[in-house]
């Protein structure tokens, strides 16, 4: 490697990367191994006390509540790592909590409270480390070798799906043949191995220390902007932020009728959305109190949050392959040896194929044709392809509702479309989130990226709650569609609208380079 290439970002690959990649492969096997059998286990075993007609709906509710927890706790993990313990220590200790959660699932297979406590521990541990492992990968690079980071983020995403593939294929068989104690115990063993591998590489990592207390942090700049006055002007931004706060309180007051999860997550969304909008309206007032660099850093974060918000419809569609699509697969014809949950193995298999095909064939071809597949362009197309996948899955459901017997093989096409969208959105989003985050907020920004998944599952819970309303059901009845088919088309339209808005915003987004400088 010549010295001339280092400033171009083509320096050598960090030697410590294999430890993180191996850790991620084992951890993802453990996570998807338990997640992909969760819905069928709930329907067939744990929720037997619920009437059969309501069991699938309740299983979906539990599943998406769990997903919300998994992607909510990154906020806590990112904050602890950025401010107190650093990424390595936070990942290691939360991984131990994660292992304990798996143990609870295996031990309390027939105890509702014990099993749900295990889900809570997994959500806490898995969610806590989720933003940190990806940003810990980014910390191993600097501007001298930053071009290798894209390859590693792709490899990172590939190994995630390598673990997911074998977990999706094998765990339903273990659940059927050996019972839940074994089926949930094996992922726990893999998580313990993941933690051990991560610990072994400790002395080889680059450890970026947590940021010291900063008088010009994001929250302090935002507070200064909201509270500052200007001659002859009011404080409209503060009013908007206050409106968000009032809306959050109103949402929490709806807990008895909405349920705590929907109420609390809606409150958080209102605080972030209205607080961010209000801060952007008065951000210039923070200049003088805080340096220009800090003010521009807040502006950058607010712009990133808009991108994250527009990705939430993608997640609301993507995560339902482990709930809504399994429920549909249960009613499709299939070989006696094939289990509906195993269909999910198709997703990671396609990811492992599509990532190298995109990087080696598709993207170079597009560049030769004069079209650069930038991060935001790829994400725009990814959201659109996800919407198309749901048009197809909805059409399959309509055919089933008309009495046609449909083979489970019909789900291959929507899985392919959904996976292509996933590769364009999710793998790209990891790289985008890290590269755009200011240095002092890497962990926090990555956690906000994962919070988009929480909001995606929130949309699912809200829609599921909505279709239980008599007036909504009466309207759906006038459309000629079943409730599930109507929901599928609704989510498809939701994604296509989001893709249009995302593409419009992408044209106005100015990319920045926030990789750390080389030593």
Image (cartoon, rainbow, N blue to C red):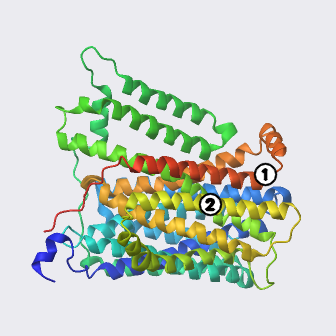
Please tell me how crowded label 1 is: few (under 14), some (14-19), or many (20+) other residues with Cα within 10 Å: some
Q: Position of residue 159 (x, y in %)?
A: 45, 78
Q: Position of residue 447 (x, y in %)?
A: 41, 56
When asked about the image quadrant of residue 181, the answer is bottom right
Is residue 2 visible in this depiction of the protein?
yes
The percent position of residue 229, horizontal first and vertical second, equals 27, 21
Spot occupied by residue 255 in the image (x, y as percentages of width and height)? 63, 38
In the depicted structure, whether residue 403 falls above or below residue 162: above
The residue sitting at 58% across, 53% down in the picture is 495
State if disc 2 and disc 1 touch (CB < 8 Å).
Answer: no
Farthest top residue in view: 232
Side (left or right) of 356 relative to 16: right
Please tell me which residue is depicted at 65% across the width and 81% down the height of the picture. 182
Please tell me whether residue 23 is drawn above or below residue 41 in the rendered image. Answer: below
Q: Earlier in the sequence, mark 1 or mark 2?
A: 2
In three-dimensional space, the C-alpha distance between marks 1 and 2, rounded to whole angstroms, equals 19 Å
Kindly indicate the quadrant of the structure image that contains residue 338. bottom right
Q: Is residue 106 left or right of residue 134?
A: right
Q: Is residue 367 left or right of residue 26?
A: left
Q: Which residue is mark 1?
A: 483
Secondary structure of residue under mark 1: helix
- The residue where tag 2 is placed is 388
Asked if one can make out residue 46 in the rendered structure from this viewpoint, the answer is: no
Count of numbered circles on the image: 2
In the image, 467: left or right of 228?
A: right
């Amino acid at each position: 490697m010549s010295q001339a290439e280092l400033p171009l970002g083509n320096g050598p690959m960090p030697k410590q990367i294999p430890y993180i990649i191996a850790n991620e492969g084992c951890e993802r096997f453990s996570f998807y191994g338990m997640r992909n059998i969760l819905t069928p286990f709930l329907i067939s075993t744990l929720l037997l006390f619920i009437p059969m007609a309501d069991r699938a709906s309740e299983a979906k509710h539990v599943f998406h509540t769990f997903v919300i927890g998994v992607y909510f706790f990154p906020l806590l993990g990112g904050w602890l790592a950025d401010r107190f313990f650093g990424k390595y220590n936070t990942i290691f200790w939360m991984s131990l909590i994660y292992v304990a959660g798996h143990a609870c699932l295996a031990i309390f297979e027939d105890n509702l409270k014990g099993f749900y406590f295990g889900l809570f521990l997994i959500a806490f541990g898995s969610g806590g480390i989720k933003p940190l492992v990806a940003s810990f990968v980014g910390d191993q690079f600097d501007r001298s070798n930053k071009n290798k980071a894209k390859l590693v983020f792709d490899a990172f995403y590939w190994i995630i799906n390598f673990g997911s593939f074998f977990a999706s294929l094998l765990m339903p068989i273990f659940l059927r043949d050996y019972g839940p104690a074994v089926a949930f115990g094996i992922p726990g063993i893999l998580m313990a191995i993941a933690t051990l591998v991560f610990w072994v590489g400790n002395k080889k990592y680059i450890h970026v220390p947590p940021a010291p207390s900063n008088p010009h942090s994001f929250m302090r700049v935002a507070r200064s902007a909201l509270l500052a006055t200007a001659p002859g002007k009011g404080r409209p931004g503060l009013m908007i932020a206050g409106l968000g706060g009032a809306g959050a309180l109103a949402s929490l007051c709806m807990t008895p009728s909405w349920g705590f999860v929907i109420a609390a997550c809606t409150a958080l969304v209102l605080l972030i959305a209205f607080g961010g909008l209000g801060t952007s309206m008065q951000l210039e007032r923070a200049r003088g109190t805080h340096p220009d660099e800090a003010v521009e850093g807040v502006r950058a974060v607010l712009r990133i949050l808009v991108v994250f918000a527009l990705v939430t419809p993608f997640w609301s569609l993507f995560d339902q392959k482990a709930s809504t699509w399994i429920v549909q697969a249960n009613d499709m014809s299939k070989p006696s040896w094939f289990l509906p949950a195993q269909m999910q193995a198709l997703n990671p298999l396609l990811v492992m194929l599509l990532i190298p095909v995109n990087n080696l064939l598709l993207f170079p071809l597009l560049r030769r044709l004069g079209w650069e597949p930038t991060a935001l362009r790829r994400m725009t197309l990814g959201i659109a392809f996800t919407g198309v996948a749901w048009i197809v899955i909805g059409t399959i459901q309509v055919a089933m509702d008309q009495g046609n017997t449909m083979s489970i093989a019909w789900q291959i096409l929507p899985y392919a479309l959904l996976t292509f969208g996933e590769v364009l959105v999710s793998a790209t989003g990891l790289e985008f989130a890290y590269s755009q985050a200011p240095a002092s907020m890497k962990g926090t920004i990555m956690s906000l990226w994962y919070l988009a998944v929480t909001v995606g599952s929130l949309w699912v819970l809200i829609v599921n709650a909505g279709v239980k309303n008599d007036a909504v059901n009466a309207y759906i009845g006038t459309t000629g569609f079943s409730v599930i088919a109507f929901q599928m088309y609704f989510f498809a339209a939701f994604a296509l609208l989001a893709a249009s808005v995302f593409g419009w915003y992408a044209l106005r987004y100015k990319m920045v380079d926030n990789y750390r400088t080389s030593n």
